[in-house]
Amino acid sequence: MALVPGALREIRSCVATARSRDPAARGVSQLEILATWPGVHALLAHRLASAFHSAGVPLLPRAIAALSRAVTGIEIHPAARIGDGFFIDHGMGVVIGETAEIGNDVTLYQGVTLGGTGFATGKRHPTVQDNVTIGSGAKLLGPITVGHGSKIGAGSVVIHDVPPNSTVVGNPGHPVRVEGRRPEGPDADWVHLPDPIADAIKALASRIAVLESAVAPPVQEARAEAGSENRVGDAGRDGHNRRDAVNRSLGPNPAGG
């Protein structure tokens, strides 16, 4: 009978977490959330499977996990350790591996993978600390640690440790900041995350445009006066001098060259 109050507390906690993290759940009754939210179903099923797994019960934990995956599209290994306040939004395609560890108040979106690498034994899945948000389609691979309060951008592939209070984007993922500040809270603005690669490409394109505008006049002059080698040589030297001046004004190459 002692299990009943604990189960009721877990159900209330799951429903409250869904209501606080999912805008679609606001104004929806607790019964409707409990009946129709797949992230809630998957977590409650995992709590049950994990309890049986910890007790050493054979077969049943994996059977519960398999049934939950079939119903919700969310796969959580019974041995995975998940803290309080965990929420999976939508959830289809989420995979959480055997040795994954998830702290408190963590939010996952659809398509997230907390996966392993290779066939090594022991700890081979990520550790996600408290207050982390992981965007749609992100892949976290290997025994890495994602620090407290971090955000993983949608579609990122993370294979290295993430410092606390960081925002990670890209493939491979790398930490950035949003407007010079460390973002807080579970509601990331995925649309406006910075993209350093795109910024570098834009800088290169701008640099090329400036160089072309500087080189074009002497080239045209050289073509117009192709009959005079001396004047062509002067035009070439003049173009070279202009390029040097432009390079000095532009500063270091954004591509690192």
Image (cartoon, helix red, strand yellow):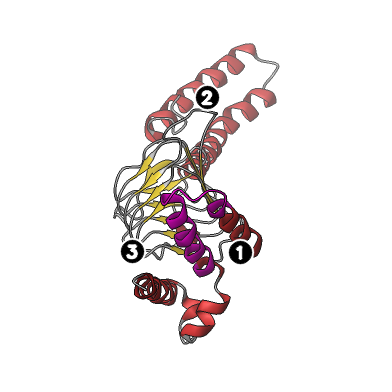
Residue 203 locus on image (x, y percent): 48, 41
Q: Secondary structure at mark 1?
A: helix
Which contiguous range is marked in magenta? 40-62
**Looking at the image, which is closer to me, 62 or 145?**
62
In the image, which disc is placed on residue 185? 3
Q: Amino acid at mark 1?
A: Thr
Q: Secondary structure at mark 3?
A: loop
User: Dot 2, how many residues are within 10 Å of its Cα: few (below 14), some (14-19), or many (20+)?
Assistant: some
Q: Secondary structure at mark 2?
A: helix
- Asked if the residue under mark 1 is in contact with the one under mark 3, i.e. CB atoms within 8 Å, the reply is no
Residue 241 locus on image (x, y percent): 45, 23
Q: Residue at x 56, y 68 (%)?
A: 38
Dot 1 corresponds to which residue?
72
The verdict on residue 23 being magenta is no
The verdict on residue 49 being magenta is yes
Image quarter where the C terminus lies is top left
Upstream in sequence: badge 2 or badge 1? 1
Image quarter where the N terminus lies is bottom left
Dot 2 corresponds to which residue?
239
Residue 172 locus on image (x, y percent): 49, 37
Discs 3/1, front: 1
Upstream in sequence: badge 3 or badge 2? 3
Upstream in sequence: badge 3 or badge 1? 1
| Res 83 quadrant in image | bottom left
Q: Left or right of 162: which side holds 207?
A: right
Give the spatial CA distance, label 3 vs label 2: 54 Å
Residue 108 visible in the picture: no
Discs 3/2, front: 3
User: Dot 1, how many residues are within 10 Å of its Cα: few (below 14), some (14-19), or many (20+)?
Assistant: many
In the image, which disc is placed on residue 222? none
Give the spatial CA distance, label 2 vs label 1: 65 Å
Q: Amino acid at mark 3?
A: Gly
